[in-house]
Amino acid sequence: MSAHSQIPILRIGSTLLVSIQIDLHDAVAEAFQADVLSAIEQRGTTGLVVDISGLDMVDTYVARILAETGRMAKLMGTSTVLVGMRPEVAATLVRMGYGLEGVRTALDLDDGLALLGHVIARR
Amino acid sequence: MIQVAATHRLSIDCEGDIIAVRRRVRDIAELRKFDSFATAAITTASSELARNALVHGGKGVALIEEVTDGSRLGIRIVFEDEGPGIEDIPRVLAGGYTTARSMGLGLSGSKRLVDEFALESTPGSGTKVTVTKWRRF
């Protein structure tokens, strides 16, 4: 598994788990997306959980990268859940007019894995 | 009357400078005891506006000012670039203007995150955006 983005990708069965703890600027963001898609391709991945509890700020650039990653994963048959968004990040995104429509979210990792289980069972 | 207590001038020449600007803004907001929501708002607006200056202006400058107005305490930031400027300001502020690298929400979104917002732009000679966030009591 490549790790060009310096964001570790963990696998639990058929689910991938990534926790973003660093600033996603251009170079990191592209490497992150490439790493996630390569990991999905490897074997039987059905779900992706992206934890952003480490981000104290999500601007429209980072939000776009996150939404894009979910859409890319979807094209490869993997469902994505975004977890751990902080209250001030949620408030800021909505006030800016960007509610991350089309992205599944859950409060925390536990809820995210449970939601993913339901989504995948329904497919 | 608004008085300037301290100024910090940061140039925006590369992507790393966007991160430097928003980190400095966050540090000042936290030092001045802004609540976490106001801190996130002014930090995020700074990130959007610094990126706009870099993407649309090629490069720019952020002048961060710690200001007071009587007993009120605030952060005022001026973003300036010498890019092509904005032809249709109302359309940009309505959020309908999109480019390849932004979602067109940078300016309109930033405006909603701050208490005061001023945009001056002359096609051909650049753009100046001034935002102010006041600390809530």
Image (cartoon, rainbow, N blue to C red):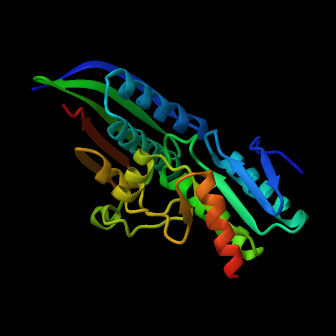
Count of numbered tags: 0
A107 or A20: nearer the viewer? A107
A25 or B12: nearer the viewer? A25
Please provide percent x and percent y for residue B98.
Answer: 46, 67
Q: Is residue B136 left or right of residue A122?
A: left
Q: Residue furthest top?
A: B5
B90 or A84: nearer the viewer? A84
Q: In this view, does B82 lie to the left or right of A73?
A: left
Q: In which quarter of the image is the C terminus of chain B?
A: top left
Q: Which residue lies furthest to the bottom in this view?
A: A123
Query: Is residue B124 among the parts visible in the rendering?
Result: no
Residue drawn where x is 80% and y is 55% of the image: A12
Q: In this view, does A73 lie to the left or right of B80?
A: right
Please provide percent x and percent y for residue A113.
Answer: 66, 60
Residue drawn where x is 23% and y is 25% of the image: B67
Residue drawn where x is 21% and y is 34% of the image: B136
Residue B80: image quadrant is top left
Query: Is residue B3 among the parts visible in the rendering?
Result: yes
- Is A2 located above or below residue B34 in the figure? below
Please provide percent x and percent y for residue B85.
Answer: 39, 54
Residue drawn where x is 76% and y is 75% of the image: A77
Please provide percent x and percent y for residue A108.
Answer: 57, 51
A113 or B21: nearer the viewer? A113
Q: In which quarter of the image is the N terminus of chain B?
A: top left
- Is A53 located above or below residue B96 in the figure? above
Residue A65: image quadrant is bottom right
- Is A113 located above or below residue B13 in the figure? below
